[in-house]
Amino acid sequence: MRRPLLQAVPQALLSWLRRGLLAARQRPWLILVGVLTVVPGLAALAAGLFVAVLFLIRVLWAWTVPDLFPGAVREGLVAHTISWLTALKVLLVALFLSALIAAGRERR
């Protein structure tokens, strides 16, 4: 009799993990190789996402602010474009404000 798919998948995953753990006991250096290949990839992915978010902030600023505040941009009160450091500061302020809002919602 065949097992339903929902029962077969966890069993297959467990057997795959068991085989991996047995192989790691026999060759412990495999764990180090796995860590050395996964960690740089995750770090590169995080760095790429970070740069993409900063780029998105810069593009959105240059796209919206001159249209919303044309007089202030013309007089030099508001920047037409922002630097990477300023985009990072805007990101930090946005993260701080979102953390405050989330903390306020958890108290209710």
Image: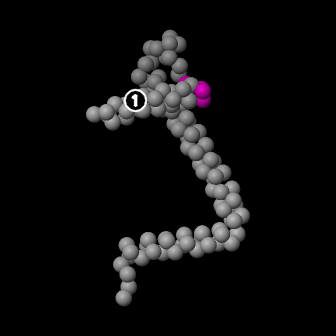
Q: Is residue 36 visible?
A: yes
Q: Quick one: which residue is furthest to the bottom in this view?
A: 1
- The answer to which of 70 and 30 lies nearer the viewer is 30
Q: Quick one: which residue is furthest to the left in this view?
A: 108
Spot occupied by residue 85 in the image (x, y as percentages of width and height): 60, 27
Q: Is residue 74 above or below residue 61?
A: above
- The answer to which of 85 and 80 lies nearer the viewer is 85
Spot occupied by residue 42 in the image (x, y as percentages of width and height): 60, 51
Q: Which residues are magenta?
A: 81-85
Asked if residue 42 lies in the magenta stretch, the reply is no
Q: Hey, what amino acid is under mark 1?
A: Leu
Q: Is residue 22 above or below residue 77?
A: below
The residue drawn where x is 62% and y is 72% is 22
Main secondary structure found in the magenta portion: loop
- The answer to which of 34 and 48 lies nearer the viewer is 34
The residue drawn where x is 44% and y is 14% is 71
> Left or right: 32 with respect to 57?
right
Quadrant into which the N terminus falls: bottom left
> Left or right: 102 with respect to 13?
left
Quadrant into which the C terminus falls: top left
